Image (cartoon, helix red, strand yellow):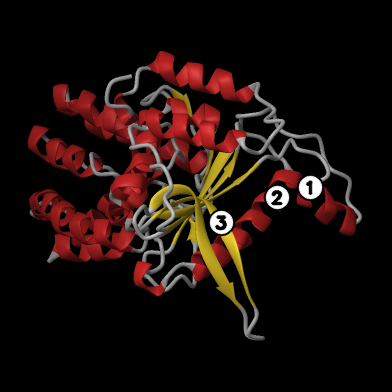
Amino acid sequence: MPGGGAGTDAAAVDAFIAKWRVSEGAERAAYAQFLTEFCRLIGAGTPLPPTSDAEAVTYRFEYPVAFHDAAGTSGTGRIDLYKKSCFVLEAKQSRLKGQRKEILLAEAGTEEPSAAPRGRRGADRALDVKMLHAKRQAEHYARALPASHGWPPFIILCDVGHCFEFYADFSGQGKNYAQFPDRHRFRVYLDDLRDPAIRARIARIWSDPAALDPARHAALATRQIATRLAAVSKALERRYDAEDVALFLMRCLFTMFAEDVGLIPRDSFKRLLRECQESPRSFKQLVEDLWRAMDRGDYSSAVRAQIKQFNGRMFAEPQVFALGRDGIAELLAAAEHDWSLVEPAIFGALLEQALE
């Protein structure tokens, strides 16, 4: 799998998943081997051997930290995997019996539900409890890092052989590690690693986590996308009401966002736009079909898929304007951005700049 990451071949990903899904990890020490192989899979460098000088190697397993509480007592701990300026990673093994997960459930008077299949998506309350405890522990370790290191932008939780969870705080304050990139996709199961885009996103956490900051991406997107949309809006406003044009563009933007976060089939809108570039006369009919399906929750022949219903009447009686090849090309260029990293609140700013 030369280079790893998004370029990793499918066979290597399948082999990794198959190997670790069946591993019950009788000893927690398996986490180091699992993570080392995972780093290779995503194309990240593997952790360095530790030395007695913690400052000499700041990408390693078992990174030592010192704790000091308000009472003046102190203690030591070790971060399972640490990379300075990138992340703190806490590893767990949810299949080991008699650990904190079961204790918490017992205290709550709750029986442990049947677990989800290893490495696959599924409801598992016991896992939720386990990972919540792991997050608190990881935040505790992040607070104990030397002040000179600053707060890591990411906290990663790893259930060995099953899934990862990602939390981010790009403020540098360590006060709000939130689900990343959002509450729907912060947990990544082994099966999800077959998606090259997911592997590439995780690899950036190892190499350039600041590049994943939505605010940074939003600023770039605002400039680039607004330019694209301005060309479309100016052409349409010569013939149509400005308010109708704004609503049309807003629907386009939301559809771009929806396909990148999985609310509609991934890349379905981009494929539709590419088809329309070849046959511009089909644009109005195909986009209307998709948006009506989004309003009703119906099958869309335009993207050949069943579509979930979108509430709020955004797509009720959608007005679609005919566009030529140039206009469709501008929409496609805007759609090529990774909208999963763009905050929905930016939509208004994009439209405002495009319509000025």
Residue 91 as seen in the image, left or right of residue 226:
right
Category of crowding for the residue at label 3, using alpha-carbon neighbours closer than 10 angstroms: few (below 14), some (14–19), many (at least 20): some
Quarter assignment of residue 170: bottom left
Element under label 1? loop
Residue 258's spot in the image, x, y percent?
40, 43
Residue 255's spot in the image, x, y percent?
35, 43
Closer to the chain start, of discs 2 and 1, is: 1
**Residue 265, above or below 124:** above
Category of crowding for the residue at label 1, using alpha-carbon neighbours closer than 10 angstroms: few (below 14), some (14–19), many (at least 20): few
Closer to the chain start, of discs 3 and 1, is: 3
Disc 1 designates what residue? 99
Does the CB distance between marks 2 and 1 fall below 8 Å? yes
- Where residue 78 is drawn, which disc sits there? 3
Residue at the far right: name it: 109
Q: Nearer the viewer, residue 239 or 67?
A: 67
- Where residue 130 is drawn, which disc sits there? 2
Category of crowding for the residue at label 2, using alpha-carbon neighbours closer than 10 angstroms: few (below 14), some (14–19), many (at least 20): many
Element under label 3? strand
Residue name at image x 41 percent, y 35 percent:
39
Residue at the far bottom: name it: 71
Closer to the chain start, of discs 3 and 2, is: 3
Does the CB distance between marks 3 and 2 fall below 8 Å? no
Residue 258 as seen in the image, left or right of residue 132:
left
Identify residue type, mark 2. Answer: Lys
Q: CA distance from mark 3 to mark 2?
A: 19 Å
Residue name at image x 46 percent, y 40 percent:
263
Identify residue type, mark 1. Answer: Gln
**Residue 82, above or below 304:** below
